[in-house]
Every structure is written in C-alpha cells, then in structure tokens.
Amino acid sequence: MKICKYLPVEHIFLNTRIPDKESVLRFIAETCMRDGVVEDAEMLYGGMRKREQTMSTGVGNGIGFPHATSWETKKPAVLLIRLAKAIDFEALDALPVDVILAMVIPENKTHLHLQLLAGASRLCQHPEFMEAVRRAENSKMLWNEIQRLEDKMAFH
C-alpha cells in the first residue's frame, strides 16, 4: 500500500517544534479536525492516547507511528512530521523520536488499516526514505521523493 496516496503535501510538516508525545498527539488531532478528516479532535486524540497506552507506537530508529481508527473518517489520512528536536516517545529501542508518521483510518476498514501500517513499516525500513525525511528542504520535494521511492519498491 502506497502511503503517498493518502499523504497530501499539506500534511507534511518539517522542523516542527513540538515538545512531547502528548503534544504530538494533540497536533495530529487538531490538524485532522482543521482539515476535515474528523469533526471531533478530542475524540481522535483520545483514540490515539488509548492506543499508546496499549503499547507505544515508537517503533525504533527515531520513528513514531501514532494511529487510530475513527468512525468520522471517510478515507484514510496520513501525516508526516519531522520534529525540530527529537522527543521521548517511549520507543521500543528507548531512543528519542524525530520522525512521526501518523495515520487515521476509517473504523470499519480493518484490512486497509493493516495494509497502511505494513506499507508505512516497509517504507520506514528503507534507508533512502529516512535520509530523505531528515534532509528534506520542503514538503513538496519530500512528497516527490516518497512517491519516487514507493514507485521503486514493489507495492501491491
């Protein structure tokens, strides 16, 4: 599953100053409300917090995958945030996180949810992706690079 299909350029944020994990989740929820992905930012924020309490989505290598399902969401939304300063995300490797790849998926689309998580995981394991995210000068150039990498990879 290609992430760029659900990641508009407007949802790529570079050098964003967010001080902690809770503020990252709030930023995601408020951005999704502002852009019409959901109507209730608090409900989305609560869903992401609940997911984080189950197990941290800090997967290692400086990456966080906060995600939640929402009955308000009609189609998946992906946000990419490169933090100006790495933060504690309770990651599995105990290292700070500087790249956030967040997803909001319609509640009744379990298969799509799993496909998006798998696609994001594959993409984040690609060394060129992480290099591109960490060196990108602007959102449009990064989106083009993500599209190029995904086209190069064997996605179904």
Image (spheres, helix red, strand yellow):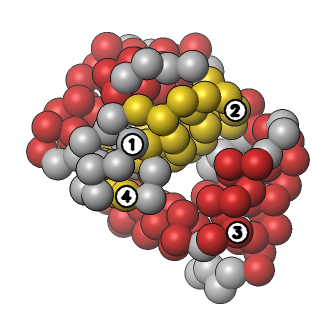
Binning the other alpha carbons within 10 Å of mark 1 as few (below 14), some (14 to 19) or many (20 upward) gives: some
Q: Please identify the residue farthest to the bottom as the structure is shown.
A: 154
Tag 4 residue: 60
Quadrant of res 15: top right
Residue that carries the numbered disc 3 in the rendered image: 128
Compare residues 117 and 127 and report the one nearer the observer.
127
Instruction: Indicate the amino acid at tag 2.
Output: Leu
**Mark 2 vs mark 3, CA separation in Å:** 17 Å
* Residue 96 tag number: 1
Q: Quadrant of the N terminus?
A: bottom right
Q: Position of residue 25 (x, y in %)?
A: 38, 26
Secondary structure of residue under mark 3: helix
Which quadrant does the C terminus fall into? bottom right
Classify 10 Å Cα crowding around label 4: few (below 14), some (14-19), many (20 and above): some
Q: Earlier in the sequence, mark 2 or mark 3?
A: 2
* Cα separation between marks 1 and 3: 20 Å
Q: Residue at x 68, y 48 (%)?
A: 134
Q: Earlier in the sequence, mark 2 or mark 4?
A: 2
As drawn, is 142 to the left or to the right of 110?
right
Residue 132, can we see it?
yes
Does residue 115 appear anywhere in the picture?
no
Between discs 4 and 1, the one toward the N terminus: 4
State the residue at coordinates (42%, 25%).
24
Residue at which label 2 appears = 14
Does 32 sit above or below residue 120?
A: above
For the residue marked with disc 1, what is the amino acid?
Pro
Left/right placement of residue 45 relative to residue 7 reads left
